[in-house]
Amino acid sequence: MKFSELKKKRWFRILGSTYILIIVLFIVWMIFFDTNSYFIHKELNDEIEALEENKEFYQKEIGKDKEFLDKMKDSNEIEKFAREKYFLKKEGEDIFIIEHEDSLK
């Protein structure tokens, strides 16, 4: 098929139009090559979602820590925590740690 015959085809005239070629090149440039391309925006959106999930997690942890600190304002709670967590004792007091068989490794 010769080029002159190809130029007479309707689809070639439409796709060969200068405006259509410029629009197609512009779209391809914006999707793949531009610094603000679709793929870069997708990566950034995924990163934003991950950071928002981290933010929610840390806000929950902050809430738990605030509850713990409020609970620790009471001297009886501090004593209870120290005895359970660090096995502290008062002077002249004996502590017996009882471990069940199923709790041993």
Image (tube, helix red, strand yellow):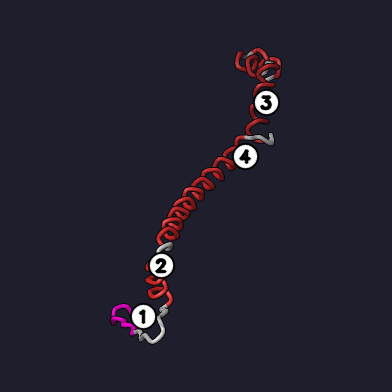
- Nearest the viewer among 75 and 4 is 75
Q: Nearer the viewer, mark 1 or mark 4?
A: 1
Q: Which mark is residue 75?
A: 2
| Distance (Cα) linking label 1 and label 3 | 66 Å
Against 32, is 83 above or below? below
User: Who comes first in sequence, dot 1 or dot 4?
Assistant: 4
Pointer 2: residues within 10 angstroms few (<14), some, or many (20+)?
A: few
Q: Amino acid under label 4? A: Ile
Against 12, is 66 above or below? below
Find residue 86 and report its horizontal and vertical position in percent.
43, 76
Q: Which residue is disc 1 drawn over?
A: 105
Q: Nearer the viewer, mark 4 or mark 3?
A: 4
User: Who comes first in sequence, dot 2 or dot 1?
Assistant: 2
Q: Which residue is disc 4 drawn over?
A: 40
Q: Secondary structure at mark 1?
A: loop
| Distance (Cα) linking label 1 and label 4 | 50 Å
User: Who comes first in sequence, dot 3 or dot 2?
Assistant: 3
Using the rendered view, name the quadrant where residue 88 is placed: bottom left
| Distance (Cα) linking label 4 and label 3 | 17 Å
Q: Secondary structure at mark 4?
A: helix
| Distance (Cα) linking label 3 and label 2 | 70 Å
Against 96, is 44 above or below? above
Q: Secondary structure at mark 2?
A: helix
Residue drawn at x 42%, y 63% is 72
Find residue 36 and report its horizontal and vertical position in percent.
66, 34
Residue drawn at x 41%, y 67% is 75
- Nearest the viewer among 48 and 26 is 48
Image quarter hosting the C terminus: bottom left
Using the rendered view, name the quadrant where residue 103 is placed: bottom left
Q: Which segment did they paint magenta?
A: 96-105
Q: Which residue is disc 3 drawn over?
A: 26
- Nearest the viewer among 8 and 45 is 45
